[in-house]
Image: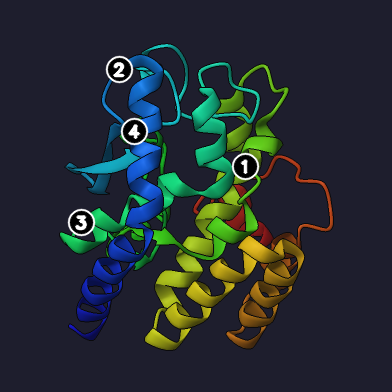
Amino acid sequence: MIKRLFDFVASLFGLVVFSPVLIPTMLLIWLQDFCSPFYVAPRMRRPGEKFKMYKLRSMVTNADKLGGTSTAGTDKRITWVGRFIRKCKLDEVSQLWNVLIGDMSLVGPRPQAERDAGLYTDEENHLFDVRPGITDFSSIVFSDEGEILAGSENPDLRYNQVIRPWKSRLGLFYVKHQSMSVDFGLILLTLTAIISRPTALKGVRFLLRRLGADGSIIEVAGRQKELTPFPPPGTELVETRY
C-alpha cells in the first residue's frame, strides 16, 4: 500500500514537472510524419495477462512489423527525433502514466513483450511476482543495450544470449530483496546515471554487495568485462554451476 501511494504521488509529480519537455517532444514526433506521437506497446503483467505500455514513439510507424523486438542503436527504424528521445530516456519518462494508473511501478523488473516473456524459464516467471517497473538494477547496468546489440546480424538472438540471462538474474534478485529503501536507492542511482554512468554502476555494485548478491552478478553489474553468452536462470547448466 505504501509503495503504491508513493508511486501514485511521484508519477503525478513527475508528469507535471516533465510536461514542458514532453509536450514539445510529442509535437515534434507528430510533425515528422503526422502520426500519433505515442507507441502503445503490449506488455505482459503476468503470464496470460497483458497491459498497454505508453511510450513516446521513437521509431517509424508499424516498426514492430518491420523487425524484431530488440533494438540496436543503429536500427534504421529509429527516427531522427527518436534518437534524441532514446538518448534522453524520454520514452521511459512517458511511462509515468502507466505508473499513475497502476499498471507499473517506479521500480520493478522491466515489462516484456509476449514473445520475449514466452521464452522465460519457470524460474524467470517469478519476475511476474511483482508489478513491472520503469527502472531496476538492470535498467542501469544495461542502459547501453542499443550499443551492445549494434552491429549484430540477429539482435534478438544476441539479446537472449548475453543480456537476458543477467537482466533476469538482476530482476529476480530485486524480487527477493525488494523494499522501500532499495527502491529509493535504485531511483537515486537511476538519476545519477544521467549524469555519470560509471558512478551509478559503482553504486549498483555497492548496493548488490550490501544485499548479499552472488559475486558473478556483482561482477557483471560493474560492466568491466565483455559480455559473453550465458544460460538463463533455471536451466540445468545454471543449476549445476551455482
Q: Splitting the image into 4 quarters, where does residue 131 fall?
A: bottom left
Q: Quadrant of residue 216?
A: bottom right
Of residues 168 and 56, the one drawn nearer to the viewer in this rendering: 56
The kind of residue tagged 3 is Asp
The image shows residue 42 at horizontal and vertical percentages of: 25, 36
Q: Secondary structure at mark 3?
A: loop
Circles 3 and 1, Cβ within 8 Å, touching? The answer is: no
Q: For the N terminus, which image quadrant? A: bottom left
Which numbered dot is residue 145? 1
For the C terminus, the quadrant is bottom right
Say which amino acid is labelled 4. Leu
* Residue 111 in sight: no
Q: Amino acid at mark 1?
A: Glu
Q: Secondary structure at mark 2?
A: loop
Residue nearest the viewer, comparing 186 with 193:
193
Mark 1 residue element: helix
Left or right: 105 in relation to 193: left
Sequence-wise, the earlier of marks 3 and 1 is 3
In this image, 195 relative to 57: left or right?
A: right
x and y, in percent, of residue 229 in the image: 70, 40
| Residue plotted at (70% across, 62% down) | 197
Query: What residue is shown with label 3?
Result: 103
Is any atom of residue 99 visible in this view?
Answer: yes
Label 4 vs label 3, nearer the camera: 4
Outermost residue toward the top?
66
